Structure formats: structure tokens, C-alpha cells
Image: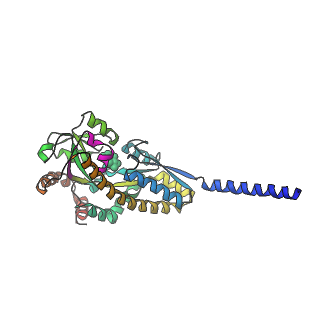
Amino acid sequence: MRRLTILLVLAILMFSSCFKEKERESEPLLVLRYADNQPEYYPTTKAARHFADLVKERTGGKIEIRVYSNGELGNERSVFQQVQFGGIDLSRCSLGILSDVYPQIGMLQLPYLYNDSTHMWRVLDGDVGDMFLSGFSTFHAVGLCWFDAGARSFYTRSPVKSLSDMQGMTIRVQENELMSDIVRLLGVTPVQIPYGEVYSALQMMRIDGAENNMPSYVFMEHDEAAPYFFVDEHIRLPEVLVMSEAAKEKIKKVDPSFLVVMQDCAKETGRFERSLWQQAEKDALENMKAEGCVITWPADATLDEFKKAMKPIYDKYTGEEALLIEKIRKE
Ligand code: GCU
């Protein structure tokens, strides 16, 4: 009987130590914070969660990524600054807020630069895209992969059917000078407002309109106050997943091989987001029609006026930069 009790106690001890071991295995050694200013279920937020799952799985649970959506960690611009200082580990940023900090990246967001989405992806997936991703190291960040965010168009509180209808309008733009310059060339007064505040600016009639891709327009319910959507697609604006240099060092300490794991997971996530994006664009268009938005697809001649107006932006680039823009156009 005594022997049986001893065996039983031993078995219990072994079982509980195994359990503790398992518990320890599943505890992350490193927790990273990931910021996105988009709501839950938006393609980039879904992609962020996908990235977190991949990283967890491939690091055996040693790295956990906590996703903070809806701008919970601050507006996009301040989030990028925090990434640079290491206060936030990862963020998905629109290039629109980066060109004041990383001016060369403005070359990827010039108006009517790409013929279409396929053209843009040829550029981003090629050596030009890689070069710009590596360039983040100058700004204390690591560029991990590109995300799709389609093309941006204007939407307004009153109808717009041509360039002349836009004259004198006050339009919200992202917080960067390049975008302000672009809309000024269209005879519009730019107002730089963070993304999360555009809804109230429209509601309170502080602005006549804004510009964005269709999914953002729908997800943020900007159509409520600005139901006229003019599909001029003046700019195709990709987004980037960035990581802080500080996070890179922390990952290296856990296991240097995890850096490559993170990079691979990011590339895979970039492809995943692209497929989500295509569906999101279709859904947004359907939603806009159902909500009764007035969608105008301008004729080529109307678009030509917009394109012509953009020439002074291109004229600012000379030498090597002008050659690079030429290369992008011909890609
Ligand atoms: C897009 C983009 C956001 C950005 C926003 C903006 O929706 O995905 O990251 O903040 O445009 O217009 O500011």
C-alpha cells in the first residue's frame, strides 16, 4: 500500500512538472506591439492578425505580436516617430505620411505614376521596391513588406464632374507637403488632418471633401457626409510594414534566426493582404452603390486635364531622381 502511495505521488509530481514545462514553453519570450490606424476587419488589420499568427507559429510561441487597431496607439505620423524611437515595435503605414520624413519615398507616390495596379506591383516587387524598403534603415526602421491600398480619388459634399468643379474647394489631405502640393495644383486648398479626424471634419463642414481609396471611404463612413465620389485615381499609394531597429535587436537576442522568420512571415503577409485588398475594393464599390453614393467615372479627356496639371510636381525632380522616375514609369 505504501509503495502504491509513493508511486502515485511520484506520478503526480512528474505530471505537474511536465505541465509547468508546457506552460513555460507557451509563454512568449518577447511581446511586440503592432499599430494600425484602420478598424478591425479592414484588410490591413486582418493582415496584421495573420502576421501575428504566422510569427507565433514559426517561433514556437516565443514571439507574440499584439495588434492595436483603430489608431489606439496614436495617429499614423506619431506612431511612425515612435517606431523610430523604439516605443512601438511594428506599424503599417501609408506612404502618404512618410514622405516628409523619408523624402525619396515620395517618388513612389507621384500622381498618375503607374498605369495600373499590376504596373505598381512590378515596381514594388522588383529592385526599386527592395531599394526603398532597405532605405528605411537610414530612418531607424526596417522596411518589411508592401501592402496594397489601391488608388485614391476625391469625394466631396457637392458634385464634382470635372477639374473646374473643384476650384476653390477645401480638401483634406494626409499630413505631408507633397500631397498638399498635388492638390494645390488642382486649384484646391489642402487641409492636413489625421485620418481619424476626417469624419468629424466632414460632418462639421470644416472641409468640402477628402480623398482616399474606396475601402477607407466606406469603412470610415465618409460617404455619409460626402456622397459624391469622383474616380480620378490621382494617386496609387502603397503602404509599408515597418519594424523598429530596437525591435530588431530584441528579436536577435531571443534567437538571431528569428529575424529571417519575421521577414519571411512579412513577405507572406504582404501577399495575403493583396488578395484581401482586391476583394475589399469590390465590396466597397458594391456598398457605395447600395448606399446611393453618386459615383462619377471621368472620361479620358477629363483625366488628361488632371494629368497635365501635375507636370510641375514631376519638374521638381532632376538628375538621378528624374532617371529613377523614368525607370519606374517604363517598368
Ligand atoms: C488610407 C491608409 C491609412 C491612412 C489614410 C489617410 O486609409 O490606409 O493608413 O492613414 O489613408 O488618408 O490618412
Q: Is residue 134 visible?
A: no
Q: Position of residue 157 (x, y in %)?
A: 21, 39
Q: Position of residue 188 (x, y in %)?
A: 18, 42
The residue nearer to you, when weighing 249 against 286, is 286
Furthest-right residue in this view: 2
The residue nearer to you, when weighing 233 against 181, is 233
Position of the N terminus, as image quadrant, is bottom right
Q: Residue 150's quadrant in the figure?
A: bottom left
Above or below for 275 versus 175: below
Furthest-front residue in this view: 290
The residue nearer to you, when weighing 310 against 317, is 310
Residue 245 magenta-drawn? Answer: no
The residue nearer to you, when weighing 93 against 99, is 93
Residue at position x 60%, y 52% in the image: 27
Q: Is residue 150 left or right of residue 84?
A: left
Q: Residue 281's quadrant in the figure?
A: bottom left
* Number of dots carrying numbers: 0
Above or below for 175 versus 272: above
Which color scheme did the rendering employ for the protein? rainbow
Q: Is residue 210 visible?
A: yes
Q: Is residue 149 left or right of residue 168?
A: right
Q: Position of residue 60 (x, y in %)?
A: 57, 60
Q: Is residue 30 left or right of residue 95?
A: right
Q: Which residues are magenta?
A: 213-232
Residue at position x 13%, y 57% in the image: 300
Residue 224 magenta-drawn? Answer: yes
Position of the C terminus, as image quadrant, is bottom left
